[in-house]
Image (spheres, rainbow, N blue to C red):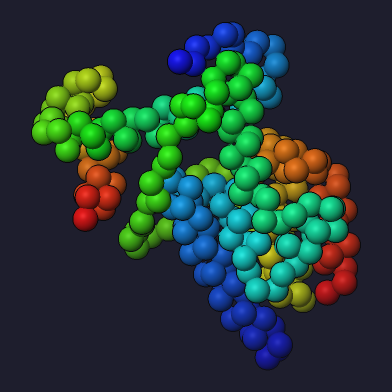
Amino acid sequence: MFKRIRLRLRDMKTINKLISGADEQAGICGEEEPGAEHFILSALNLPDGSAKRVLERLGADPSKFREAIKEQYNEPLRSVGINPDIIETHPEPIESKKVFHNSKPSGQHLIKSLYDLKQKDKDRPLLSAHVLSAVTKMDHGVAIRAFKILGINQGQLTRAVNEELDLI
Amino acid sequence: MSTIKSLPSADNPEEALATVVSLRRMAEQLEREAVKEAISQGWSWSQVAEALGVTKQAAHKRHAALIKKTNK
């Protein structure tokens, strides 16, 4: 009983850190609202380190995820003949003082998947690897394309997340 | 100067939609910077809205808060 309450309190702290971190990451990228990719960047900064270890299991450098997000925007531009290095504008960081959090649809989808996951996995604390697990429920979008840039497909990500969570 | 050579075929939605997302993001960044510059050059919100083809309210709602923050 007390264990469950402690877990719940810990999960609430983790969710707060995850959401405020995603808002911050979106701001750094010059975007008003966080998408799934900003939640991943936030998860990679969470102290439990499990999301970082998932990427390392797959031979990817977690610090390269931000670069992969940028590249998945640049690659399609190059394919239509636009050189992103020449025309790229440098977004100014956006400082948000919003009282109520809002996310892009991909961010909302991720939070909903995270909630569903936690409903099924009540005995473990919420970990940054759970965020990656929620991403595996997605088929398209910026986050999925960024993983592809890193050479990671959904099957590989799902297996690595499960291996990491099985150790905890 | 960059020119668009060709657009991906709609037959490949994965590629076409990824391109749409990139172009839209690029346009949004350019819009934000251009509006900020216009306001700093003394344009009114009505003029900005007219140039963008939106209502004054829409232009103001979309950009005013961000411009105030970056001008602080």
| Quadrant where the image shows the C terminus of chain A | bottom right
Q: Is residue A139 left or right of residue B37?
A: right
Q: Residue at x 48, y 64 (%)?
A: A20
Which image quadrant for residue B61? top left
Can you see residue B23? yes
- Above or below: residue B53 compared with residue A19: above
- Measuring from the top left, give residue B45's x and y in whole percent: 15, 32
Which image quadrant for residue A152? top right
The one of A147 and A18 positioned closer to us in this rendering? A147
Q: Residue at x 59, y 31 (%)?
A: A74
Total tally of numbered discs in the picture: 0
- Measuring from the top left, give residue A134's x and y in whole percent: 70, 53
Q: Is residue A143 left or right of residue A163?
A: left
Can you see residue A112? no
- Measuring from the top left, give residue A78's x and y in whole percent: 61, 22
Q: Is residue A95 left or right of residue A39?
A: left
| Quadrant where the image shows the N terminus of chain A | bottom right
The one of B2 and A151 positioned closer to us in this rendering? B2
Q: Residue at x 59, y 11 (%)?
A: B7
Which image quadrant for residue A57? bottom right
- Measuring from the top left, give residue A12's x and y in whole percent: 57, 74
Q: Is residue A130 left or right of residue B22?
A: right
Q: Residue at x 13, y 30 (%)?
A: B43
